[in-house]
Image: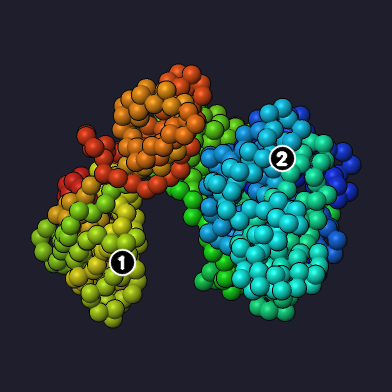
Amino acid sequence: MKTLNLGILAHVDAGKTSLTERLLHTAGIIGELGSVDDGSTQTDTLALERARGITIKAAVVSFALGDVTVNLIDTPGHPDFIAEVERALGVLDGAVLVLSAVEGVQAQTRVLMRTLRRLGIPVLLFVNKLDRRGADPERVFQEITGKLTPTAVTMAPDRVIDLLATLDEDFLTGYLTAPDAFTPSRLRAELTAKVAEGRAHPVYFGSAITGAGIDALRDGIENLLPAKEADVHAPLSGTVFKVERAPGGEKIAYVRLFSGSVAVRDKVPLGDGEGKVTAISVFDNGSAVPSASAEAGRIAKLSGLDVRIGDVLGARPRTREARFSPPTLETVVSPLRPADRGPLHQALTRLTEQDPLIGLRHDEVRQETSVSLYGEVQKEVIQATLADEYGIDVTFSETTTICVERVDGTGSAVELIGTASNPFLATVGLRVEPGSGTSFRLEVELGSMPYSFIKAVEDAVKETLREGIHGWEVRDCAVTMTHSGYYARQSHAHGTFDKSMSSTAGDFRDLTPLVLMEALREAGTTVHEPLHRFTLQTPADTLGPVTALLARARAVPRTTLTKDGTAELEGEIPAAKTHEVHQLLPSATRGEGAMETSFHGYRPVRGPVPSRSRTDHNPLERKEYLLRVLRRV
């Protein structure tokens, strides 16, 4: 059985879900087309999706196309839900990127195409909404070749030949020598190979609403994208890309099976352990149906496994991971009813299972829980989900920007066992210095003390680095353990374990934050704010007001080009200021300015250094820390 796991991706409102409906209708899966506006589509099943007319959660539906079973994954288009798209990309064989014939290439379109090309995922492009007023397919095609990919090609024989000749010297030589040998089927085979390599990107035009161009797109999906005959006899290999909860609270894992097979009651390798599959559903003919087993190539829903998104079943597949920007906003979620504080934290913890990029920080002292976000729309989704699924009504504080800390230099500290100032039965010495990513290294012998003690130090280091000197996560930091020491297990005369004389993992876990913070204090840290790259188009005669607006927002234009009365600026802008510029841009440009932004990295904060309240036991203040950990100084 050949399968094709196909993603439908787009900027919000380009018509992605409408295209999904049309493909399902043409395949005979649904009798009549659903409407995004009416909230009656097959894949948008959440109440909030139907109410707002946007996709929030990735949805899977299956249909037959010739001798290929297509597992179609409809993904969100709104940038607030980019995490859903990120997880879907890792399980795709091919993708259709949808553009509007009216709006053309938009901000999210560029982000998605860059990622698809980097991952080597074969892509077809569908220019939708040809039936709308203002549709301009020629302009949009020029935008595609200029902003997305220079190897886009419309499906006209002469243009396909020109592209193949540009991409392949052997093809050019052969075609010039014997053009009659290149039959339509051979040209299709040549193009299919280039599409599979990610070097050619066919473009189709049509309308999901009227059905125009859909037959040609279906032909491209069936014949140009690489359907695969998976190896069902190989060892099991699968990836969890989505987790949801059944009405009874049981986890349901969406798994792309790359090889092997799995059956109900099978015990499957899962990380360092294993899990038992209690139920299986596979996607078939438009819906998920119960099955006794699932084979490679399929997307299956597995019950009974304690998993998180990104977990691997069996052998790790050879796939490349998408890397979208991290969330850069944070807000405090508060229940309207004080009695809901405990249930709220539990509910938010469950939501992080479905979206790991929603980070949680819980402050025991203030009894506050903060969540990280991509944008304001996510607030509405979280608020509606908590009310509908958990019966908890919440409010949000004002959204703030998430900064990070980076180490300035090298710092070290050590606490020795048995000294008056150290109440823990442990010796820990640490050195911190700038690094690429965050790492933990050993300068002590691995056998110098029990591994569980070393592991306790490593775990405590990772936990402590979540809140640095100023309360922000410390990034790009290399931590080296330089000293170690412990008291071996001691017993009383009658053989019972004596904690007061014996080191435990808890001693190392509790001492490490004090040592690490002292080393960080010596090394020094600098707070960095998130930075976005922007591209801004505006009438040339408004360049003055626009430049002044960018200056007030602490943006730094790098290039400015003016052509045919339009100025285009590119540069960097603090993430905290993008919303403000978006709001003020229309008044500065007579409503004609447009700005696209994407995450670009971090830069040192200029001016007052922002800090964030701590949620740990505050190892920066030794007395306070010991009071909280030991209830004594």
Which is nearer the eye, 517 or 287?
Answer: 287
Percent coordinates x, y for residue 598 in the rendering: 46, 43
Mark 2 = which residue? 128
Which is nearer the eye, 604 or 362?
Answer: 604
Q: Estimate how packed mark 2 is, as few (under 14), some (14 to 19) or many (20 or more) residues with alpha carbons within 10 Å.
A: many
Horizontal arrangement in the rendering, residue 195 relative to residue 612 (left or right)? right
* Residue at disc 1, secondary structure: strand
Q: Which residue is drawn at 16% across and 67% down?
A: 417
Residue 84, compared with residue 500, is above or below; it is: above
Q: Quadrant of the N terminus?
A: bottom right
Instruction: Using the rendered image of the protein, determine whether residue 586 is visible from the camera's viewpoint.
Output: yes
Percent coordinates x, y for residue 488 in the rendering: 24, 76
Residue 493, compared with residue 610, is above or below; it is: below
Q: Estimate how packed mark 1 is, as few (under 14), some (14 to 19) or many (20 or more) residues with alpha carbons within 10 Å.
A: some
Q: Which amino acid does label 2 sit on?
A: Asn
Colour scheme in use:
rainbow
Horizontal arrangement in the rendering, residue 550 relative to residue 379 (left or right)? left
Instruction: Find residue 589 and name its label.
Output: none
Indicate which disc, 1 or 2, sits on the residue closer to the N terminus.
2
Q: Which residue is drawn at 63% across and 40% down?
A: 140
Give the quarter of the image for residue 370: top left
Mark 1 = which residue? 440
Percent coordinates x, y for residue 160 in the rendering: 71, 58
Percent coordinates x, y for residue 382 in the rendering: 55, 36
Q: Which residue lies furthest to the left in this view?
A: 420
Q: What residue type is labelled 1?
A: Phe
Q: Which residue is drawn at 30% across and 45% down?
A: 603
Residue 389, compared with residue 251, is above or below; it is: above
* Residue at disc 2, secondary structure: strand
Give the quarter of the image for residue 544: top left
